[in-house]
Amino acid sequence: MKPSRRPQNPLFSSGPCAKRPGWSLEELDVSVLGRSHRSKPGKAKLKEVIDLSRAVLGVPSDYRIGIVPASDTGAVEMILWSVLGARGVDMLAWESFGKEWVTDVTKQLKLPDVRLHQSDYGALPDLSRIDFARDVVFTWNGTTAGVRVPNGDWIASDRQGLTICDATSAAFAMDLPWDKLDVVTWSWQKVLGGEGAHGMLVLSPRAVERLESFQPDRPLPKIFRLTKGGKLIEGIFEGDTINTPSMLAVEDAIDGLRWALRVGGLPQLIRRSEHNLEIVAEWERDSKWAGFLAADPATRSCTSICLRFTDPEVTAMGPDQQAAFAKRMAALLEKEEAALDVGSYRDAPPGLRLWGGATIEAEDMDAVLPWLDWAFAVVKAEMKG
Ligand SMILES: Cc1ncc(COP(=O)(O)O)c(C=O)c1O
């Protein structure tokens, strides 16, 4: 039976993610649009993003926060290019974004001393094998596998290397132990539902020390340069961006951050997202056809919730047929306007992915699950017919 109730907001994409409840373009303050980002009010807006991000996330006062070009990818790559090579590096990857950073380090930077800790979709690599005398690069939440690290206990407090953490689908939905992290990055279009464009780059004092003491023997394009004459360009961390940002995206980021404070700050954002995961987990326990891609419940993401097929007739099919099955389900859900953009990532195992970040309302998560059951039943009947 087709469910009678649709989610009020059927947007479950894992990026760009749904806008905050009640968002409206008209509510954005557009007074600085058309003005220089280096004007006094323009720079104040950029600084406001930095200050609000610090306030919401509880970033320590001695950590720098900068707004950088090219979204999360820009933030990650500028730091890889700027600091790696001083030590050996341990690279962790368990889904496609982590693998991108492995490609950067092995095929582009061609660093000589790299150890890879990789695992297949659904599991984490063995975290006990990481050597913190070396630099360590990892994603906190693997968006395309729905697998996250359970906490920061595996990270050495007395490390000699730097920990570089891509937290783009974790920040604002998961606790990040700042004392264990030297570099943290994210983009705006994830948990707070902002716009793609700019990346956030957080540096611990140890990361700054590395930037100021190590000069990699490689060319750095202007948009990667964080130092000048061997000193950190402090302006980047006060709102003097390297190049021109979208002030509309900036305004929207401020809107998301203010909403975060209004709803109760980080604890409440985490609670909203974890509650969305609980709703799916309760449904999954009784599901005859779907299961979490993340095998260990402690590693299940509360933002990118990835589901695989468990129905024996579907799992007996080859990967291409399973992918076609999932695609057909996603198309039906879209046609019904019950759930948009819920197909799994193109390189991930076939299945569905629901975003459960803080901007997703629990009622909508609750309402979408019967639609998944309906779409599964329809496609299975089509397959048999
Ligand atoms: C873990 C992770 N890293 C990096 C990226 C790339 O982010 P962006 O498109 O903001 O550069 C994504 C996007 O989904 C991601 O989930």
Image (tube, rainbow, N blue to C red):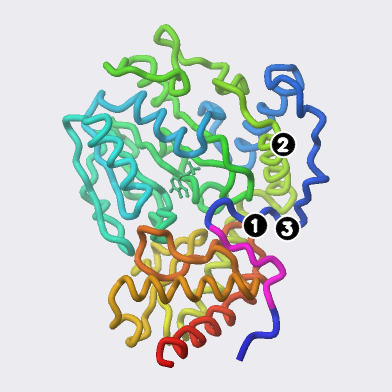
212 horizontally vs 242: left or right: left
Task: State which tag comes first along the sequence, 3 or 2.
Answer: 3
Marks 1/3: CA–CA distance? 6 Å
- The secondary structure type at the circle numbered 1 is loop
Quarter of the image holding residue 36? top right
Please give the range of residues in magenta. 6-13
Provide the residue designation for mark 3.
21
Quarter of the image holding residue 273? bottom right
- Say which mark, if any, is on residue 333: none
Mark 1, other Cα within 10 Å: few <14 / some 14–19 / many ≥20: many
Q: Is residue 351 above or below residue 190?
A: below
Foreground pick, 351 / 176? 351
Quarter of the image holding residue 346? bottom left
- The secondary structure type at the circle numbered 3 is loop
Q: Is residue 349 above or below residue 249?
A: below
Q: Is residue 151 above or below residue 39?
A: below
Residue under the point 50% across and 61% down: 302
Marks 3/2: CA–CA distance? 17 Å
The residue at the far left in this view is 112
Task: State which tag comes first along the sequence, 1 or 3.
Answer: 3
The residue at the far front in this view is 385
Mark 2, other Cα within 10 Å: few <14 / some 14–19 / many ≥20: many
| Residue 288 picture location, percent across and down | 43, 87
Residue under the point 46% across and 33% down: 75
Q: Is mark 2 within 8 Å of ligand 1?
A: no
**Amino acid type, label 3:** Pro
Task: State which tag comes first along the sequence, 1 or 2.
Answer: 2
Q: Nearer the viewer, mark 1 or mark 2?
A: 2
**Amino acid type, label 1:** Thr
| Residue 245 picture location, percent across and down | 62, 28
Provide the residue designation for mark 1.
359
- Say which mark, if any, is on residue 251: 2
